[in-house]
C-alpha cells in the first residue's frame, strides 16, 4: 500500500466531496457581497501574515474565497469552469486526492507568504504583486489540463478550446508573476504539482523509451524484404515466396526443397538430412 493509500485509509472520511464546487460557490457569493458592500470584504478575507500573527487565523483559508475577478462575465465563467473541473479531478483522484492536492497548495502558498514576511524584516525584499487565490486555482487548472489535455471546452460559451492550451495560458500567467517578483510564492505553491506529476512524467518517458527500444530490437530481428534464407537449387523456390515449404541443405551446401526431394529431382550429392522417401 502506497503512502497516499495509507493516508486515504486513515483520513479519507474527512475529505470534503465536491470541494472545488464549494470553493466556486463561495467565490460567487463573495463577488455578490463585494459588489454590495465594497472592497472591505476582500480585505477581511485576504492572506496577510501580519494579521494572522495578530490572531486573524481564518485568513489562512479564507483567501481562496476571494473572487479572482470583479468582472461579472469573467466571474460567471470562472465559477462554472471550476465546477466543471471538480468532477474531472475527483474522477481521477477521488475526493481525498483532490482535497490533499488543494490544501497542500494552500499550505505552501501560506508558507511562502510567511517566508516573504520574515525576509522583509531582515532584508530589503519587496512585496510581490501576487493574487494568491489565482495561484491556487491556476495550480488546480494546470493539474486538470495535465490529466485531460484533449478535453475541449467552450470558452465563455463560444470559443472551443482544448484544456492543454488553457493550461499553457495559466503557466504563462504564473511565469509573469514569477518575473514580477513572486519568486517565493509561485515555486512553493507549485510543490504539490511537481510532486504529483514530475515522477509520473519520468515514469512515462522511461516506459516510452523502453517500448521504442523493444520495437527497434524487434524490427532488427525481422528478415529484410528481398532477402531469403533458402532458395532451392533445382526449382528456384524460396522461403519468402513459399513460407510453408521446408528446405534441406546438402553436403555440398546446396538448398533443396522437400518438393524436389520427394520427386527425386536431386543430384548425386545427398543432403545432410535425409529426405523423406518418395511416395509409392
Image (cartoon, rainbow, N blue to C red):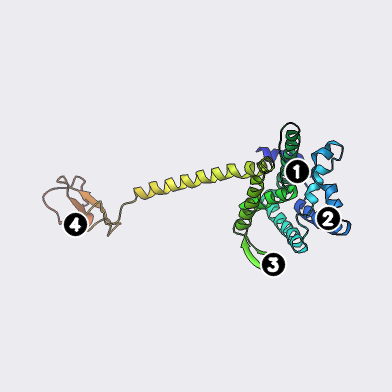
Category of crowding for the residue at label 1, using alpha-carbon neighbours closer than 10 angstroms: few (below 14), some (14–19), many (at least 20): some
Secondary structure beneath label 3: loop
Q: Earlier in the sequence, mark 1 or mark 2?
A: 1
Measure the C-alpha gap from mark 1 to mark 2.
29 Å
Q: Are marks 1 and 3 in contact (CB under 8 Å)?
A: no
Q: Which mark is residue 219?
A: none
> Which residue: 86% across, 40% down?
56
Q: Is residue 30 left or right of residue 80?
A: right
Residue 124 position in % (x across, y down): 71, 35
Q: Are marks 4 and 3 in contact (CB under 8 Å)?
A: no
Q: Is residue 49 left or right of residue 208?
A: right
Q: Which residue is mark 2?
A: 30
> Which residue: 14% across, 46% down?
252
Q: Which residue is mark 4?
A: 260
Measure the C-alpha gap from mark 4 to mark 3.
76 Å
Q: Earlier in the sequence, mark 2 or mark 3?
A: 2
Q: Nearer the viewer, residue 46 or 57?
A: 46
Q: Is residue 234 above or below residue 107?
A: below
Q: Which residue is mark 1?
A: 12
Q: Is residue 80 above or below residue 61?
A: below
Q: Nearer the viewer, residue 18 or 265?
A: 18
Residue 111 position in % (x across, y down): 74, 38
Residue 259 position in % (x across, y down): 22, 57
Q: Which residue is mark 3?
A: 157
Measure the C-alpha gap from mark 2 to mark 3.
23 Å
Query: Nearer the viewer's eye, disc 2 or disc 3?
Result: 2
Secondary structure beneath label 4: helix
Category of crowding for the residue at label 3, using alpha-carbon neighbours closer than 10 angstroms: few (below 14), some (14–19), many (at least 20): few
Secondary structure beneath label 1: helix
Amino acid at each position: 500500500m502506497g503512502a497516499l493509500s495509507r493516508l486515504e485509509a486513515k483520513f479519507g472520511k474527512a475529505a470534503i466531496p465536491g470541494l472545488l464546487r464549494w470553493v466556486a460557490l463561495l467565490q460567487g457569493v463573495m463577488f455578490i457581497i463585494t459588489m454590495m458592500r465594497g472592497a472591505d470584504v476582500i480585505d477581511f478575507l485576504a492572506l496577510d501574515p501580519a494579521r494572522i500573527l495578530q490572531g486573524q487565523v481564518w485568513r489562512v483559508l479564507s483567501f481562496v474565497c476571494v473572487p479572482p475577478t470583479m468582472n461579472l462575465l469573467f466571474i460567471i465563467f470562472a465559477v462554472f469552469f471550476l465546477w466543471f473541473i471538480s468532477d474531472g479531478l475527483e474522477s481521477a483522484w477521488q475526493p481525498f486526492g483532490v482535497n490533499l492536492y488543494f490544501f497542500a497548495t494552500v499550505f505552501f502558498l501560506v508558507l511562502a507568504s510567511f517566508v516573504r514576511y520574515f525576509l522583509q524584516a531582515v532584508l530589503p525584499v519587496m512585496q510581490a504583486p501576487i493574487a494568491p487565490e489565482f495561484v491556487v486555482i491556476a495550480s488546480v487548472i494546470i493539474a486538470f489540463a495535465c490529466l485531460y489535455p484533449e478535453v475541449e471546452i467552450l470558452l465563455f460559451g463560444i470559443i472551443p478550446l482544448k484544456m492543454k492550451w488553457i493550461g499553457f495560458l495559466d503557466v504563462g500567467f504564473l511565469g509573469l508573476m514569477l518575473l514580477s517578483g513572486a519568486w517565493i510564492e509561485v515555486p512553493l505553491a507549485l510543490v504539490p504539482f511537481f510532486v504529483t506529476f514530475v515522477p509520473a512524467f519520468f515514469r512515462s518517458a522511461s516506459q516510452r523509451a523502453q517500448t521504442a527500444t523493444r520495437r527497434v530490437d524487434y524490427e532488427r530481428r525481422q528478415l529484410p524484404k528481398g532477402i531469403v534464407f533458402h532458395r532451392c537449387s533445382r526449382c528456384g523456390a524460396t522461403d519468402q515466396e513459399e513460407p510453408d515449404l521446408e528446405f534441406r541443405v546438402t553436403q555440398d551446401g546446396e538448398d533443396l526443397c522437400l518438393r524436389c526431394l520427394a520427386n527425386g529431382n536431386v543430384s548425386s550429392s545427398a543432403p545432410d538430412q535425409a529426405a523423406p522417401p518418395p511416395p509409392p
